[in-house]
Image (tube, rainbow, N blue to C red):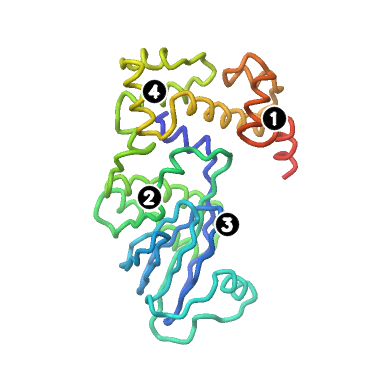
Amino acid sequence: MDALSTVLEATRLRSVVYSKFPLKAPWGLDVIKDENSQFWRLVSGSCTVGSPDGRIIELEEGDLVFVPHGSAHWIADKSTSLRIPSPEFVKARRAGIPIFSGGDDVTILIAGHFEFDYQPLHPFLKDLPPIIHIRQYVTENQLLLKQVTQLMLEELNNERPGSSVMLKCLSEIMFINIIRAYLEQAVPDSGFLSALNEPRISKALKLIQDSPQKHWTLESLASEIGMSRSVFFNQFKKLVHETPLSYLTNWRIRQAQKLLVTGNSNISEIAANVGYQSEAAFNRIFKSKTGQTPAVYRRSTFFK
């Protein structure tokens, strides 16, 4: 499995499609900060987004904006339109109260969010910019986004058995294609995604992710990928924004979290499976990263 796929499995990507929003101009929403990544897809009409970094982005039909860190932003038909807080809009919709329904110019949006489990956050997520703007269909991945959107619209317009699961799967496919399209539009010069484009650093990531139980050292990883210790350390840290051994530790903890939630192994077995021969050392490191001991983490997650 490629390194990015392994990361997405480990972070337990989940997605929620809120709805298809028909909005009559003038309309506007101030979107509050949220712990989840959000997306907006403009199906038809006009739309302007106030980016978390202060930019104003004019969307064209077919464009998509993705807010990876759930930062506060705004979205409206025009930058001058009156905006209301997003919780008020959600509350009114749930109560069946018409809102933004007075004009003739209709904008249709598909909106939703992506959730990722586990702390600490993977560098892949931390390194994404405040907002990603995917322009309408030009490349193959953007064409795939178009097809996914069309399938979403069919499910939203014609609710059928299994529609909620279908929408969940489609939005997860959408996330992968957002990342692919982002890489086509602007390849970052640092961060986890750029590391995937550097063959030897990508190989080191794959070694760590495929075999966290091995007794990896800086020297053994550098030897495996054919780099000197110092060059490997500096290049890895520059691209991934973590040292190799810090990444290894965080990856082991993510894998342990997964095993604690999904498996039946006892804690000493899980410790060994992720590279710790001492259960006491595993407990200490796990708590330093998550704020809980493995046993408490397992119980608290089980009863959620």
In the image, 278: left or right of 18? right
Residue for badge 2:
178
Please state which of the two labelled residues, at mark 3 or mark 2, is closer to the viewer.
2
Q: 246 or 144: nearer the eye? A: 246
Q: Which amino acid does label 4 sit on?
A: Ala
Residue for badge 1:
294
Q: What residue type is labelled 1?
A: Pro
Going from the N terminus, do you reach mark 1 or mark 2 first? Answer: 2
Residue for badge 3:
161
Q: What residue type is labelled 3?
A: Pro
Classify 120 as above or below 244: below
Callout 2: 10 Å neighbours few (<14), some, many (20+)? Answer: many
The residue at 30%/33% (across/down) is: 197
Going from the N terminus, do you reach mark 1 or mark 4 first? Answer: 4
Q: Quadrant of residue 241?
A: top left
Q: Which mark is residue 230?
A: none
The residue at 49%/72% (across/down) is: 29
Disc 1 element = helix
Alpha carbon distance from label 4 to label 3: 44 Å
From the top left corner, tell me how far across and down residue 271 is, in percent: 64, 20
Classify 100 as above or below 49: below
The reply to whether the C-beta atoms of the residues labelled 1 and 4 are less than 8 Å apart is: no
Please state which of the two labelled residues, at mark 1 or mark 2, is closer to the viewer.
1
Callout 1: 10 Å neighbours few (<14), some, many (20+)? Answer: many
The residue at 27%/48% (across/down) is: 186
